[in-house]
Amino acid sequence: MPFSTALKLPKRPFCGSTAYTGAVAVTRFRAFAAFVLAAWLSPAWVVIPAAAAAAPSPPNIVLVYADDLGFGDVGMNGSATVRTPNIDALAADGLRFTNAHAPAATCTPSRYSLLTGEYAWRRTGTGVLPGDASLIIEPGRTTLPSLLRQAGYATGVVGKWHLGLGAGDVDWNRDIAPGPLDVGFDYAFILPATGDRVPCVYVEDRRVVGLDPADPIRVSYRERVGDEPTGKARPDLLKLHPSHGHDQTIVNGISRIGYMSGGAKARWVDEDIADTITAKAVSFIERHRARPFFLYFATHDIHVPRAPHPRFTGSSGMGPRGDAIVEFDWSVGEIVKALDRLGLASNTLLVVTSDNGPVVDDGYRDQAVERLGAHRPAGPYRGGKCSAFEGGTRVPFVLRWPVRVRRGVSGALVGQIDLASSLAALTGQPVPPGAAPDSQNVLPALLGQSREGREWIVEQAGPLSLIKGRWKYIEPRDGPRVSTSTNTELGNDPGPQLFDLKADPGERRNLAAAHPDRVAELAALLTRVRER
């Protein structure tokens, strides 16, 4: 007899409702009961501590997703130059992972994989998107937020989106669909793409925020629209100059990628972005404190253009890039304060991580290179954003859930792509056949109950890489060795590369010639994964 039948529970109500009713309370009980039952039946699960057994509901879940934050950019991973006290406090009170990976070394594919549980390289059109791209997640497909919404969670996304909006040419002056509300979120307050791409406006649910109908927005990535000045033609109007690219329409004294006209009252002020989206994230938590919620808080920091609020100017001693890290840490602190103030901290699973590795000069002359000093954004790892080396995808990852997760450090191999299956298991939700095909349930590792995570993981840059145990294989790929724009080592090589990450975490010694059998084994495994 099904567990729910034995309890004679009614069917789960539509979870998009904001009313807290008895039916929602039943939904919460069903999800928690399934969670406890799964824990009891799983051989990998340890005995539930008394505090967790007494938890009144399944946990709230907050995922804070930084942009371009490197492994070495935070104090918990050894940075002695940039202060990140809020992130470091989470690590002291939670579980810090040293072998956690973003799915890709660039933004859009990591976000796609995170939300769908599918490696982005399996789909065409999932590279870094222009600001006017169509939605690349099919409406109605199973996603991380849709699985949690099925479990009775209120689901919200606040911050950077960069997964496309609409279908075809978007009219920014009307309802914009499909979008986040069509792939599992109940609420959205987003930057459509990135801060360096037009349109430079916020979209709340389906509408541009603060748009004056008499000043309609036009956007193009093909040709200039309107008579807005560009950075290329009018550098005298700029307060932040580009180092490469980023020389089209000027918004707030900063030239961007792409052309935009209109929407003057709706345009954001870069220095206020962190304040605006952090306030929206806190507001979402406040509105849904009486029921389980999932918040995907995707910050703009520390992506370019780096224009932190004046109160953070000079706070790092490293220029705008370092100041943006301090601002990101402040945003994390505001989330923690809200959870504490509302009495939600003990039963909230809070994750802080990044979409890919670091980049120093990413298109603006903001002194990031000149003021880097001894700071190592990728920590001990080679490469960074766009790189097949570890600096591209090995990212900060800390998880805190006081009633369930013990403090410490974990070397388990885990990937952000696994959050879909793992959180579905936590909340008692079955993953439908064919959904989240590359996501694995590594919940015991995430909760600190097991030292083992995945057996292997695939990383996407130019070439694909595969890590299994101590070994990392990078498939052969012709192409430049170093990016001419960002000066990042890309990891391209016409021959196979093999590294012993335990003995050589900096990937300096290619052992492919010395271990041909290991190369053949990992290449064959990567082929099987690719063809599956």
Image (cartoon, grey):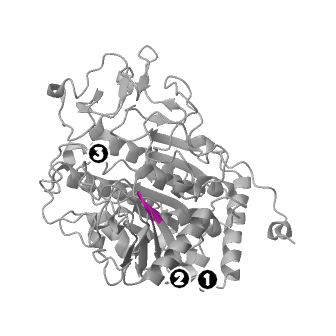
Judge whether residue 338 can be spotted in this image. Answer: no
Identify residue for label 3: 304
Residue in the picture at 26% in, 30% down: 252
Which quadrant: the N terminus?
A: bottom right
Residue 132 seen by the camera:
yes
Q: Earlier in the sequence, mark 1 or mark 2?
A: 1
> As drawn, is 265 to the left or to the right of 440?
left
Q: Which residues are magenta?
A: 459-464
Residue with the mark numbered 1: 45
- Determine the CA span between mark 2 and mark 3: 38 Å
Against 269, residue 459 (above or below) is below
What amino acid is at disc 1?
Answer: Trp
Q: Nearer the viewer, mark 1 or mark 3?
A: 3
Residue, disc 2: 449
Numbered disc 3: secondary structure? loop
Looking at marks 2 and 3 on the same chain, the residue that comes earlier in the sequence is marked by: 3
Q: Do the residues under discs 1 and 2 have CB atoms within 8 angstroms?
A: yes
418 relative position to 400: left or right? right
Nearer-the-camera pick, 494 or 286: 494
Q: Position of residue 438 (x, y in %)?
A: 59, 64
Q: Nearer the viewer, mark 2 or mark 3?
A: 3
Quarter of the image that includes the C terminus:
bottom right
Image quadrant of residue 227? top left
Q: Is residue 25 above or below residue 272?
A: below
Q: What type is the residue that disc 3 sits on?
A: Val
In space, the residues marked 1 and 2 are separated at their CA atoms by: 7 Å
Magenta run includes residue 148? no
Whichever of labels 1 and 3 marks the residue nearer the N terminus, that label is 1
Alpha carbons under labels 1 and 3: distance apart: 42 Å
Identify the residue at the far top of this view. Answer: 214
Q: Position of residue 41 (x, y in %)?
A: 71, 81
